[in-house]
Image (cartoon, rainbow, N blue to C red):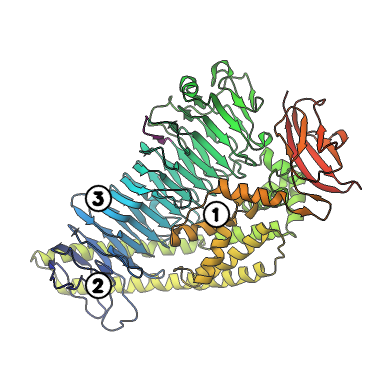
Amino acid sequence: MAQICEPCGGTNPTFSLVGQFPIQPGCSGEVSFVTSFVNNNSCNVEYFLTLTFTTDDDPANPTQLIEYFNNLTYTGNIVMTSNTEGYGIYLEGEREGFAWANVNEPWTNMTFTNCATGVKGDIYPGKVENTTMTQVVSGISWQSSLDMSVQFRENRITARDYGIRSFINEPLRGGLGINKNTIQITGTSNPNRILAGVKADEGGYTIAGLNGWNILLNTVNMDRGGEGIGYRNGYKGKIANNPSILNNNRQFFYNGIRIDNSKFTDVATNSIGQVAGGTGLGVSNGIESSGGFANSFSCNGFDQTNYGLTFRDMADFSQSVGGNCFGCHAAGMRIEGGAFIGEQYHTGNVWDLTKINTCGGGIGAINQGNPLFSRFFVDGFENPSFNPPVTPANWFSNDPTPEATVVCSGCALPRTTPRADSDKGLTALDASIATGQFTGILFPAEEAWKADYRLARKLLRHPEYANEAPVYAAFKAETEATSAGQLAYVSETHAGLFNLSATEVAASQQLWADLLAQTAEIRRLDSLRQAGAFVDGTAYAALLNQNTATRGQYEQLNMTHAAARVLQINTLLAYNAAISAALDCEKNHKQINTIVLNWLKEGMGTPHATALADLRAIANQCPMKGGDAVYEARAFVSHFTGESFDDAALCAAAADRQRLQPTAGRTERGMLYPNPGSGLLQWSGANPPAKARVFDALGRLQAQLSFSGGRIDIGHLPAGAYSVQLLDAEGALIATQKVVLQK
């Protein structure tokens, strides 16, 4: 069935439709469209073209075919209501079936104008190439097509809200991606509704041998702020060699690239900035990264943003932040309160000191989090005269050995870096967690749980790490009986639900290859028939029968895999239900496991209203307090509602509430500040602890102090990082806080 715009408003649209081969019962041939529509400006339709092919013998079970579209021009003026959306092309498939949509070719033209969405695909492999989309709300929107081939390349998109949107499409077959597109976003962004050139909300799923999105060589212009490229919950993605990600108006909130809770992802060799001129740099970041692990940020060039690189939440990117070039910023790099990124050695980052001083900040890098877990070791080879200035002053350590490990050919594109494809072994952060030395700053209990959860996931990915030192074996054994270890197990198993055995992979790939070869031959013969050439009818019929049989085998194999996956999901749901949860982060992880696992069972469509409301409640929390489940919830909420989230505001509000909550009736919550500081520490709450014990980084007791006027003084100790135990009048432990003493 090809559903064309019906006459409306007294106007009969004119159109031509050629090359449509009839679909007979049991037929599995290819259908080609060459269409042209004119005089369609007053037609209000739900879809411009709906591609759902149904055989006459079984209308309830659509037969998925190969669809090729060439020279399709759309100039409709679709009027949207609350219940309809205008699509240029809408493709809807099924997970067990075989389909492929080839939307346009490099040598043809295809134009979409005045659509709500130019091309939309649900559970569908395919390619959208060399199209022109103007005056659309969203250019391309694709969802729920993981373990399929999906590619968007060389499209020219001018959209109000989103250029290209992806939801739960990773990992992808064939190393495909979002490449060489030119995107302009004309709408206005704010922190609670952030528009994007490319927006990928993924699920963190893993399949052996497959990677996430390659987002390469795109040019993105944001007229009024937003995110050039957004990537949430990605796995093994690569965002690289994008030559221009630009904001054209500094009045509006802007992130060139934003990465949330992604893993093993390379962000490299991108050029990011804002147009020169105007007053100030606005609320802007070249790259903002929140959470995640084993990502790499290297060889990127930043200019004219308030901060070049901003890191939020806890992460471990040890030895992976290097070769970046910082220009005009208030500070080239910033680590926000409570955040850390792991240790960096000889990373070869470059600061333009002239621009830094001109822009009024005069600071190369600022750490508002915990410097103990984000130390930089640099030398004169990388930073002559040990510049730029950083805050706190001892955050960067001078290591005179000249051995920069990241060299990016200056600050000029292109630059090349390897893909980050594995954990970098056990790190100093891992050691602090395993030995019980890790202490959170803003939300001590939740951050400590989150740290345990992350290390537990790492040890599940790499069981051999537990044998590297007794402390890791002990940590693994202890956490297996805790909610952190149990929920880590659910998360790791959930992420791998689509993995297959080597034998199953080989069988699936062979059938897929056979289907592609057969359908390509059907296409060739159909082209000959359309041109009037002779085609042997017996051979053609045999080919169709062979294709039908192969498709049946492929669908049966996928149904077998799906049935096994449902059994795994049911087992995980039962295990998850038995986990005890007390903290918000524990409850969030447990709840989102239930919602998302059931969503997978139900076919990966639009979540039920109740589930979406529960996801919104999780998504609107501070991730440092609510855990990584917050990012998982945001993928759903952002895609289905368009909402965005301002972590600066959410975390500040959560920290304020935390300080006002009493702890076990003993004292009001608070923290020691300033941190880092020079010695005198003030308690931020109304009722301070009575006593404090101060330990150095090796766990040795250095001082026992009593609070006076809500203050203690550790100025007599050497500069460095300390762990302060806060005690009530009876000597019971209230909390532990890390502090950094500067001299």
Q: CA distance from mark 2 to mark 3?
A: 30 Å
Q: CA distance from mark 3 to mark 1?
A: 33 Å
Q: Identify the magenta region.
A: 269-277
Left or right, 316 with respect to 536, comes to: right
- Residue 316 lies, in percent from the top left, at 61, 42
**Of callouts 1 and 2, the N-terminal one:** 2
- Residue bearing mark 3: 130
Kindly state the secondary structure of the residue where label 3 is placed: loop
Kindly state the secondary structure of the residue where label 2 is placed: helix
* Residue occupying image coordinates x 39% and y 55%: 165
Q: Is residue 449 above or below residue 282?
A: below
What amino acid type is highlighted by mark number 3? Asn
Q: Quadrant of residue 124?
A: bottom left
Left or right, 278 with respect to 458, comes to: left
- Residue 150 lies, in percent from the top left, at 36, 56
* Residue occupying image coordinates x 69% and y 56%: 484
- Residue bearing mark 1: 631
- Residue bearing mark 2: 544
